Image (cartoon, coloured by chain):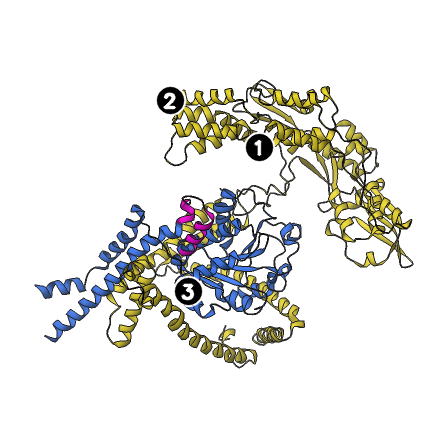
Chain colours: A blue, B yellow
Amino acid sequence: MGIAIIEKLASLDRRWIFLLMFLAVAIPILLELEFPEKPTLLAQDVFDEIEKLEPGDKVLLAFDYDPASEGELGPMATSFILHCANKKLKMYFLSLFPVGPQMVEDGITKVILTDFPDLVYGEDYVNLGYKPGYEGVIKVIMTDLRELYTTDARGQNIDQIPMCQDVENVQDMKLILNVSAGYPGSKEWVQYGATAYPDKVKMVAGVTGVQAPYMYPYVPKQLKGLLGAIKGAAEYETLVNEKYVEGEPKPEYREGVRRMGPQLIAHLLMIFLILAGNILFFLQKRIQRL
Amino acid sequence: MKRTVPLLIAACCGVVLIITAFIPATVSWGETATVWFDILAAIAFVLGGGNLLKIHLKKVSDRAAGWAYSLITVLAFLITLTIGLTKWSVPPATDQERYGETFATLPLDDLPKSLTFTEQVDLDAKYAREELPDSVKRQLQLKQENDRIVSLIFRGWMKPGQAQELLAAHQNLEWQSAIESLAEKAAVPKSMRGKVIYHADHEVLSAAGVLTENGEKELLAMEASDNWDEAVRTLTEKTHRKTTFQLREIPAHFKIPEQFAGQVKLVDQSLELTGPLTPAMQNAFTNIFPRSRPMSKKDTKDFVQKVATLDGGLTKEQKQLFTALLGVSWNADQLIAVLDEAGKSKPVIKTYRELLKEKQSGVRELEPTKPSTAPDIKLNKQQIKFIRDNVDNQQYDLGNLAGDLKERGDWNTSQQQALGKFLQKAPTIGARNKLICLALTKGKSKLSDAQYSYLLEPYRVEHLWNGQIYDLLVKSHEVKYPWSGAYLQTGSPFWFAYEYAFKPLTATMFSLLAFYVASAAFRAFRAKNFEAFLLLGTAFIVLLGRTFAGAWLSSLVPDTLPMLRVENITIFIMSVVNTAGNRAIMIGISLGIVSTSLKILLGVDRSYLGSGED
């Protein structure tokens, strides 16, 4: 009897596991499960690096991700914009992903147009759009922005955009904030931006969980701070909301924390599945020996 | 040859990039090489598209396994390409269309001779050696004799923006004086100012609104040439195009502004318009709604009471908030301060010619301004009393305030403008009520449908009217650059494909990983040996450490042993163990890259060029 159960569980139809995963994600979403976040040092470093800047300082926001990674990276991109807008920094958006400009526009609509209507396009923020060429783009704009960016994403001549007139290259930026889903992304910005001009260029990044382990070796010299996946986003979001949002933050500004609920249950399920799989594995081995 | 050329290109680019990494002076070489790489990459995109079509069409043609998927791929590719490239159903960009203007093609060479303006000067030839601003390059000519610039020749009328760019091009009084004189000569005649202009970059003669009979005569009198005559007549004809627009609703107090009575007629429910609707007209037509103003305590109380008596009522907190919000408005003191400030005489800015004259007469420290001869004007007691008595009187029309103040004392145009700007800053009653609604329904507070209808009715009328006038602006406009809109314009087919197909599909594909990882965790993640056991242990810690569960479990760990907290162990694993391993791998990869790059640059490794068989 016991052997039969073990054999049945070991050869469990994977659709049951899919169903469990579905429930593990769906139930916390429906119940709006949220847990407190205690910022780790890396998220604090990202926050502090932006805090050090003065109003009017220029920051480059490179949003190198697409809708596939929006679930993981969207909240940190939103928090970056919210933080910069509150600090009254000059925001220069660009992307090395073909659909990155849409991610930029989404962020601008969600934060700037909704909660900072006094910020003026071309004076306080500008979307430079997408340029093909992978790390080649980074290499060129580090020394000459106009070599590749002659217009913004709307087709307006860059020389007619007030906040671009005194920008020669990316070295004029006080900080690079990169949100990256892969190649080209944080690694390339570190290699061709931060590392090539260590005295002039500072950088922080928010990356996917898959990328994070590859970025740790660059912290803290080439990368001043790092947000890893939705966990990093939730921690940073907490810091920004605590300092700049009065009262209960809007759902758009709590997305990181909200998405940590399903992540917790899904992680616990994964641990359970790994344990269950191994227990069954050892039981099967024992049965075979008998 | 077929393989040698790409090999040489790769080798040259590689060598140049290596050189630029070590010699700062050669950075621009690297930029050029990278830009060329971008161009080649763009061509590769086209080749990639061609290759995709070739492979999938062949599969469809051969009815190979999965040919239906190939067909879907090809169709999706072609649809996306077509709607993206042709910007199908994308409206033109509003910032490039020059709403209210009508164009007639006229090459620069066909401009009348009387529109060539010359300013005799004696300037250093260095100005001719430097590049002119883009906006004037085609129109301005610097004539030189004996290494001096002797005249500035400008073709067409000079726009204020062009004059500003030219003045800013060289911070030198001789140059700026010459440009100032030229700009005055080349300005549009007073009688035509704001009505016609020549856009040299577009090679068009442009008219704002309707070109009147007198205007046409004046333009025709400038020169009797066929091309000029044709352009003027075309412009006149185009600007008399009729547009009829059916209105859904007309605000009760709407009247056609007097200055536009000749161009617009209201017939029943339709607006009949001659020529295009200009932005100035649009502004005059939409700026008809009363703006919020200070309210007396009685008026405030009555308004709050009126809303409170409607179905649903108001809570005590809502009433307090409502009263407070109605009190947030400008007041008489602010208006008086603004008008007094505007009445002060301002220093007059000197012209560049005056400054040059002063410089030539030996003045060392030049002052850019001179005192005004106009006296300061301050509101008198009568005017102040009139303002205080009437600003919160809802029966008094603030549109008459300028006239009434003028009757009671000194008044100047600067004050008139300041008054207009001040009143314009206040939100309309509709916009104010909308904000009040939002504030009153924050949190768990609610309003009834009747209260919403009462409060938002002014906003509904305003919003609908402004939308109708915008539709009239678009309908009466002749599209000039149909492809100027952004391909991802909200509501366009490409946007629709992106928003409702690409975005959810890619997100779904990525999300599916969670299910497969879960399945793999159950079936494949087994502690078969010591290494696998270590891997499993690490995975457990990191999985827990990335969630609240780690922090919760760690609460059992005594404070004296922080290193045993799950989140701290996670950080240790990531930043020490992971970093060490990754650095080792990265160093190995880097050495491999150096070796492979050298092989490619020297032509030893040619595998990237293909097999060479086809």
Q: How crowded is mark 2: few (under 14 residues within 10 Å), some or many (20 or more)?
A: few
Mark 1 vs mark 2: tell me if same chain.
yes
Of badges 1 and 2, the one in the foreground is 2
Where is residue B8? Give x, y as percent: 60, 76
Q: State how far apart marks 1 and 2 are (Cα).
A: 35 Å
Residue A240 colored magenta? yes
Instruction: Answer with left or right where residue B186 lies relative to residue A60.
Output: right
Which residue lies at the image location 71% right of the left edge and 33% below the top edge?
A: B342
Where residue B115 sits, quadrant-wise, is top right
Q: Which amino acid does label 3 sit on?
A: Ala
Amino acid, disc 1: Tyr
Does residue B470 lie above or below B106 as drawn? above
Q: Main secondary structure of the magenta part?
A: helix
> What residue is pinned by disc 2?
B311
Find disc 1 in the rendering and name its residue: B470
Labels 1 & 3 near each other (Cβ < 8 A): no
Q: Nearer the viewer, mark 3 or mark 2?
A: 2
- Picture quarter containing residue B407? top right
Q: In the current view of this chain or complex, which residue is farthest to the left? A: A1
Is A186 in front, or is A240? A240
Give residue B141's position: percent from left, percent from top.
Answer: 82, 51
